[in-house]
Structures are given as C-alpha cells and as structure tokens.
Amino acid sequence: MSGTTTAAAALRRRAAGAGANRWVVLVVLCVSLLLVAVDATVLHVAVPAVTEDLRPGGIELLWIVDVYPLVCASLLILFGTLGDRIGRRRVLLLGYTLFGVASGLAALADSAQLLIVARALLGVGGAMIMPATLSILRQVFPDRRERALAIGIWSAVAAVGAAVGPLLGGFLLEHFWWGSVFLVNIPLMLVSLPVGRLLLPESKGDGKGPWDVVGALMAAAGLFGVVLGVKRLGSGESVGSLLTVLPLVVGAALLAGFVRRQRRRTYPLVDLKMFARPAFSTSVGCIVLAMLALVGLELIAAQYLQLVLGLSPLETGLRLLPLTFAAMAAGLAGARMLRRFGPRRMVCAGFCLTAFAVVLLTALGRTDDCALMLSGFVLLGFGLETTLFGAYESMLSEAPPEQAGGAAAIGETSYQLGAGIGIALLGTVMNAAYAPGLSGVPGVPASASASAGHSLGEAYEVAAQLGGSAGAALRHAARDAFVHGLHVTLLVSAGLLLLGAVMALRLPRVMQCEPSESVELPAPRDAAESRVSV
C-alpha cells in the first residue's frame, strides 16, 4: 500500500511539475513575477525626468504611468485562457519576448505618444506572463500547507517588486538617462527565455468547448472604457462631458454584457459561480483595495520625497526601502500566521495595521521627518503584505484545482486593476485637493495659476518662469497645496482600507487543510506532449 501511495505521489509531482522540482519552478515563477511587478513602479521616480524631457500634457503623463497596468489588467483573461488552450509555458515565453522588445522601444522613445505605445506593449507582455505564475503554482503545490508557504514567497516577491522599482529607478537615474529604467529589462529577458524553456513545465486546460474570443475582447474593452472615464474625471473634466460619460457608460455596458455572456455559455472563459463563494469574492475585493492603496500611495510618495523634500531619485528609492523589508518579513511569516490566526483575523488585522500607518503618515509636512517616515513605511509594508498574502491564499484555495487558471486570471486582474484604479482614483483626490490652493496667489496671473494647478512639477516650472517675489510665492503655495493634498489623499486611503477590514470579516475563521488534495492528472500521452518546446 505504501509503495502504491509513493508511486502515486511521484506521478502527481511529475504531472504537476513535468519533471522539474516544484521549488525550482517556484523560483522561476517568482523571477517572472518580479520583472512584471518592478516595471509597474520603476517609472514612478522617473516621472519628473520624463516630464522635463518629453514635456507630456497632464493626460499624457497619466497615461504614461497608468497604461501599463491598465492594458495588463484588461488582457489577463484573454491570455490566461489562451494559455489553457495552447500551453501556459508557450504564452509565458512569448510574453518574455514581447516584454524585451517593448522595453527597448520604451527606452528609445522620443515622444510621449511613442512612450505610451511602448508602455502599452509592455502591458501586453505582462498579461502573457502573469497568469502563468499563479496557475502553475496552484498546479505544482496541491498540498495547502506547502502552497501557503509558496504563496508567501510569491506574494513577498510581488511586494518587493513594487517597492524595489523606485529604488532601481533611482539608482539608474543617478547614473543614466530615464530610458535606462526600461533597458534593464532586456538582459533579464535574455536570461529568462532559455531558463524558462528548460525548467518550466508545459500545462494546458481540459480544452472543452470553444475559446470565447468575443467575451475576452468585451472584457478588455469594458475595462478600458471604465478606467478612461475615471481618468478624465481625475483630470478635471466635467461630469457631464460626453467624452467622460460615454466611456463610462459603454465600458459598464460591455462588462455587464460580458458577465451575462459568461453565465449563459456552457464553457465560459471565467466560471462566475466562483464569485458565489463568499471567501473567493471577498478575497478578490481585498486584493483590489490593497493594491489600490499601495501603488497609488507610492506614486504620490515618490513625488513628495523628490519635489517637496528635494531628495534625489536614489535617495527616494532608499526611503521606500523599509517598505520592501517589511513586506518580505510579512510574506515569509505569512504561512505561520495564517495557520495560527486564520484568514479572517489575518486579513482584517493587515488592513487595520495599514490604515493606522496611513493615518500616521498624515503628520508629514514640508520638513523631512525620517523617523516618522520609517515607522509609517514599515507598518505600511507589513500590513499590506499580510493582507495580500491572506487574500491570495484564500482565493486560490477556494477555487477548485480544475479552475486554477480562471482563478489566477481573476486574481491577477484584481491585482493590476487595483493598481491602475489606485493611481487614477488617488490621483483624482490629490488633484482635487491640490488645485484650489493655487488660486488667488498674490502677484501671480490667473493663467499661470491655472497651469500650476496641473501638477507640482509644472508649478515649479511656472514659478521659475515668473521669477522674483511672484515666482517664490507660487512655489511656496504649490508646496503647501501639495502637502495638503497628500494629507487628504492619505485620509481617503485610510477610509478605503478600513472598508477592506470590514469586508474581510466574510472570510473563513480558520485555515482548513484537507489531508490530501487531488490534482487532475494528464494522460501519459498528454504528459509527454506537454514537453513540446515553443
């Protein structure tokens, strides 16, 4: 009996990992995730340099930063289900290739429009890469205890990538031009392609039913429309403007149509019945709220550190480094905390700790308070990573193994969508609180005040052009207005985080581990065919 069990376990590992050690597979998946996560935030510290060189408009600057997570989130379902059809490793390696090509295009961009296109292509590559990480992880770690540890490492890498991005960008900007933040992707891609081809297992779904291309395009277009409308509102456009209302209405209609279409199909792209499970739907909502706070606050924090405190890009990245270490600690301790406290208490406590850290940071002002910033960032990193770990683990464990690909696409869409909406939403709050502070500055013409109200960087440029007492007054008012906007944004973020804490009360109280979880094994012929190279 024991020999049969051992043989079955060995077969399960081979089917899950295609002959590769599952922990080696985890390392490769984490490297893939790190690359995508870093690129989502590496541009943040380079925004002032990009603004000075390419001189994009307010909307163009928002798109330069936000188009990457938006495109990535929009296409995750499409490429996640495509991977189920033609092989997840194959789509992953194609994503590596496109990511490298788009990185070179972004580095050499000589206009804001070309940079937006390149960032959009990076988003396409990221959408090819990201679904594979969670779906393969769910496949190669069928035991929940091991999977919890693997997800802890995986989620720590995700947080590290988001936090290391500004540090890496700051280092590169100290020595090179802003395009270097993209060129660094190319050597990583050249290494990842052969390593991934050798070590990653090929896997596919059951292949039942036709692939719903129309549904995937509806979801992508719907997400684009909704976020575009939010962006226009954030840029100060009137709520009644046709160009604002139309994308919102069309986007919402397309998403509603997508949901209706999936419910009616025998073989849907995404099994929406998973959302009927409270633990699954709650976990997805928690991921959105957590990423909304993290990425939006990091973008604003980078501007505060550089433009208000006058720190260099490298110094800015170093100030954000404690967030990285705290996130790593929370991710590595996540499996033990989850077993001890359970998903409900763990995620709820993570949200509350993060909200406390955000409120603590409202004490920041025009002068540098290193101790306060260190405390706030450590609590912020630990709290957010605790939240993300508990939410991801609950979401994956709640989904049936045969639906791991759909669950991974939903989780990654939530992650990227939360990041994209976070920048748009918190940027909207920031602009709404910042702009009124620049109206009626003594000695400053109304046209100059209006231009300065677009951003703090533009306010500094206008102040330099004015010169004299008027320029000094505008610069002083812009700095004060930005700090005020930062405080308002932090309070709004704290409110959203507390909402997440309330939402987390629907999660299970304890971590339930079954003695043995089965995985769907491919037939021997399928297992052999899964090793076909790209």
Image (cartoon, rainbow, N blue to C red):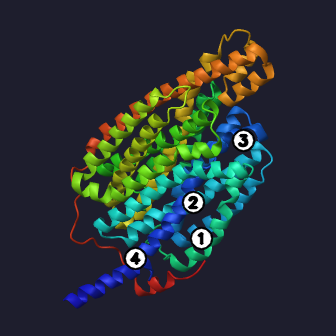
**For the residue marked with disc 1, what is the amino acid?**
Ser
Query: Between marks 3 and 1, how big is the CA–CA gap?
Result: 29 Å
Q: Which residue is mark 4?
A: 16
Residue 211 showing in the rendered view: no
**For the residue marked with disc 3, what is the amino acid?**
Ala
- Asked if 4 appears above or below 411 in the picture, the reply is below
Mark 1, secondary structure of its residue: helix
Q: Observer-nearest residue: 280 or 300?
A: 300
Q: Quadrant of residue 15?
A: bottom left
Mark 3 burial class by Cα count in 10 Å: few <14, some 14-19, many 20+: some
Residue 188 in picture, x, y percent from top left: 63, 66
Mark 3, secondary structure of its residue: helix
Asked if the residue under mark 4 is in contact with the one under mark 3, i.e. CB atoms within 8 Å, the reply is no
Q: Which residue is mark 2?
A: 35
Q: Quadrant of residue 141?
A: bottom left
Q: Which mark is residue 192?
A: 1
Mark 2, secondary structure of its residue: helix
Q: Quadrant of residue 299?
A: top right
Residue 488 in picture, x, y percent from top left: 49, 25
